[in-house]
Amino acid sequence: MNPKANQKAVILLSGGLDSATCLAIAKDAVYDCYCLSIDYGQRHSIELAAAQNVAKSLGAIEHKIVNLDLRSIGGSALTDTSIAIPEDEPGGIPVTYVPARNTIMLSVALGWAEVLGANTIFTGVTAVDYSGYPDCRPEFIAAFQQLANLATKAAVGGQRLVVETPLIHLQKAKIIQLGYSLGVDYSQTVSCYQADQQGRACGRCDSCRIRQQGFSNANIPDPTPYQ
Amino acid sequence: MNPKANQKAVILLSGGLDSATCLAIAKDAVYDCYCLSIDYGQRHSIELAAAQNVAKSLGAIEHKIVNLDLRSIGGSALTDTSIAIPEDEPGGIPVTYVPARNTIMLSVALGWAEVLGANTIFTGVTAVDYSGYPDCRPEFIAAFQQLANLATKAAVGGQRLVVETPLIHLQKAKIIQLGYSLGVDYSQTVSCYQADQQGRACGRCDSCRIRQQGFSNANIPDPTPYQ
C-alpha cells in the first residue's frame, strides 16, 4: 500500500497551468486532494471557473473558493483596474505582483489544512520561468513552513506540516511535459491576466508569453484559446 | 523631532482591549496609524463596530475592514455557531482558537503595509494572561517577521519590516493600566466572544473572565457593559 493513500493534502489551485500540474502530481502521489482557490478580486476572475473545471477533471475530493477582497488594499495591476497589464518585457518585479498574495493564500491553506487534519500543502510556485515574484522563491517557502510549524494547535500537538513545491525548480516546458504525462487538459487552464469572460487569452501579457514559450519549448501544440 | 513622526504603521485592531491598547501605544510613539480589522465571519461581529469607534477615538488616519470569510473553513467556536462558547475553565487550547487566524491577519496586514509603504505592523498579542493560542507566542511572531522579510517586493528592495508586539510580555492588569494612562476608553472595546448586538458582554466566557480579572488586579473599575 502506498503510504500516502488516504492522506489529505490541500492544493492551492489558481486555475492556471502550474497549479493544475501540481494537483495532478499530488493526485498521482495518491493524496486525497482538497483544492483551495481564493477569490481575491482578481481581474481575471475567469480563472476561478477554470479552477473548478480542473479540480473536477483531476478528481479532487473538494474544491473550496474562499472570498478575500484584496481590491480594498490594491497595489497591483491584478486588483486595481486603473493599473494596466504590461505587454512588453518587464524590468524587475512587474506591476502584476500582488502584495503578500502567496503569504495570504498559504495562510488560508494552513487554516483549512488544520481543520481537515491535512499535514501537506501543495503549491505550484516556480522560480525558473516566472515573473520574478519574491513569494515564489525557495527561501520564502522554507520560511513559511517554519512559521506554519509554530502557528497552529496541530503544530503544538506535534503534527508537522510540509509545504510541497514540486515545480519550483522546473522549467515551464518540463512542467508542461510532466502535466501532459499525468493527463492534465491544459485547454481548461487560464494563465492570462486579461482573459475574457470565455477564458480566451490575450497572448500578449507576461503570463501568456511565458506560457507560449513553454509549449513551444516542450514541442507540444498550445491548446490555449486566444481572443 | 521624533524619528517616528510621519512613519506609517499598520495596527491590527480587533475591537478588543489588547489591540485598542496597542493602537494607543503606536499613537503615543507618534506613528501615523492605519488600522486594519478583518471581518472573518466571527460570531461576535459587534467587535468590528467597536474597532471603528476605537480607531476614531484614538486618532487613526484610516480604518480598513477587509472581508475574509473563515466560516467556510470552520473549525472554531468563533466561526461555527454549532460549537458552543465554553464558560468553564478550559484545559489546553480552547475551541475558540481559530485555525491560522493570526497568520492570516498578519499576512493581510503585510500586504497593506507594502501598499502604504509602512515598515511596521503592530499587533496586540499577549502570551501572559491569554487563552493559550499558539499564534500569540513570541517564537511565532519572530517566525512571521522572518517570513515577511522574504515575502515582498519591498523586502527585495531592501525595506525591513518589523512586527511590534508591545503587550506580549505584559500581564492583563498592566495592559489596562498602561492603556488608561494613554487615554483608552475601554468601555468602547468588546472582548466577549458572545457579546450581544449592543456590545454587552456575557461575563462568563474565557475572554470575559480574563478581562474581568485584569480590571480587578489593576484596581480600576470595570467599565464593560454586561448583559
Image: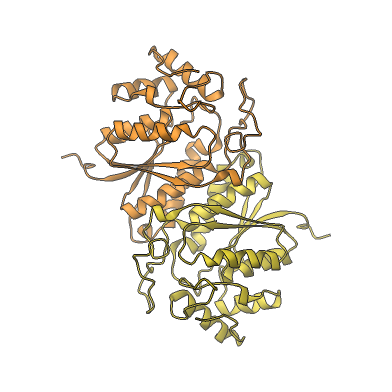
Chain colours: A orange, B yellow
Q: Position of residue A108 (x, y in %)?
A: 44, 49
Of all residues shown, which one is farthest toward the right? B1
Q: Residue at x 67, y 74 (%)?
A: B184
Q: Is residue A176 left or right of residue B49?
A: left
Q: Is residue B60 left or right of residue A74?
A: right
Q: Nearer the viewer, residue B76 or B130?
A: B76
Q: Nearer the viewer, residue B95 or A40?
A: A40
Q: Position of residue A102 (x, y in %)?
A: 50, 41
Q: Position of residue B192 (x, y in %)?
A: 49, 73
Q: Is residue B31 left or right of residue A147?
A: right
Q: Is residue A97 left or right of residue A57?
A: right
Q: Nearer the viewer, residue A18 or B15?
A: B15
Q: Is residue B19 above or below residue B100?
A: below
Q: Position of residue B136 (x, y in %)?
A: 49, 63
Q: Is residue B9 visible?
A: yes
Quadrant of the rendered structure where residue B18 is?
bottom right
Q: How many marks?
A: 0
Q: Quadrant of the N terminus of chain A?
A: top left
Q: Residue at x 41, y 15 (%)?
A: A222
Q: Residue at x 44, y 62 (%)?
A: B134
Q: Is residue B150 visible?
A: no
Of all residues shown, which one is farthest toward the left? A1
